Amino acid sequence: ASPSANVRCVVALAVKHAVVERPHAVDAPLSSAVLSFLSLAADSDRSVRRAAVASMAAAAHHKATLVAPHLEVLLPMLYKNTVVQPVRGEPVVFGSAKGDERGPGACL
């Protein structure tokens, strides 16, 4: 793994764009390496985790056979990324609704 979060993020997003609906020559090499790419969902950098989760969703949607054998490893990482993290700072009031400083609909 690269020490640069930007490189790891680009790699995770490249997997998302490599997975296409129709059969392709990249499917065989990708199937043997998909777990290492999607395991970036446990990365320490938030942008890398987001990119890996987006790639995981694309792979599950377009080529479920790539992801299915690795669900025991990938699902705990995915669930960990769905927990709303506490935010520093005070809540922000949006009229009658209350949110945090990240804005409405924010996650991670």
Image (cartoon, grey):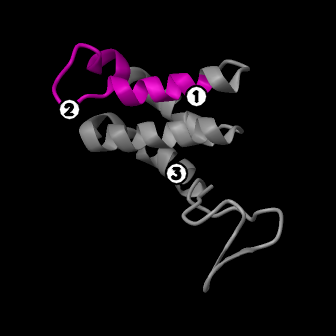
Relative to 91, residue 28 above or below: above
Q: Which residue is mark 3?
A: 78
Q: Nearer the viewer, residue 66 or 6?
A: 6
Task: Tell me what residue is drawn at x 71 percent, y 21 percent.
Answer: 4
Q: Which residue is mark 1?
A: 9
- Where residue 48 is drawn, which disc sits there? none
Is 77 covered by the magenta stretch?
Answer: no
Mark found first going from the N terminus, 2 or 3 = 2
Q: Which residue is mark 2?
A: 21
Q: Which kind of residue does numbered mark 3 sit on?
A: Leu
Mark found first going from the N terminus, 2 or 1 = 1
Task: Tell me what residue is drawn at x 61 percent, y 24 percent.
Answer: 8
**SS at circle 2:** loop
- In which quadrant of the rendered view does residue 41 lie? top right
Image coordinates of residue 3 in percent, x first then y, are: 73, 20
Q: Which kind of residue does numbered mark 2 sit on?
A: Glu
Which of discs 2 and 3 lies nearer the camera? The answer is 2
What's the distance in space between the residues labelled 2 and 3, CA to CA?
A: 22 Å
Residue most extreme to the bottom: 96
Q: Nearer the viewer, residue 94 or 34?
A: 94
Crowd band around label 2 with a 10 angstrom C-alpha radius: few (<14), some (14–19), many (20+): few
Residue most extreme to the right: 89
Relative to 20, residue 74 above or below: below
Magenta segment: 8-30
- In which quadrant of the rendered view does residue 17 lie? top left
Task: Tell me what residue is drawn at x 58 percent, y 28 percent.
Answer: 9
* Quadrant containing the C terminus in the rendered view: bottom right
Is residue 31 in sight in this rendering?
A: no
Image coordinates of residue 106 in percent, x first then y, are: 59, 60
* Quadrant containing the N terminus in the rendered view: top right
User: Given contact means CB atoms under 8 Å apart, are the residues at marks 2 and 1 in contact?
Assistant: no
- In which quadrant of the rendered view does residue 2 lie? top right
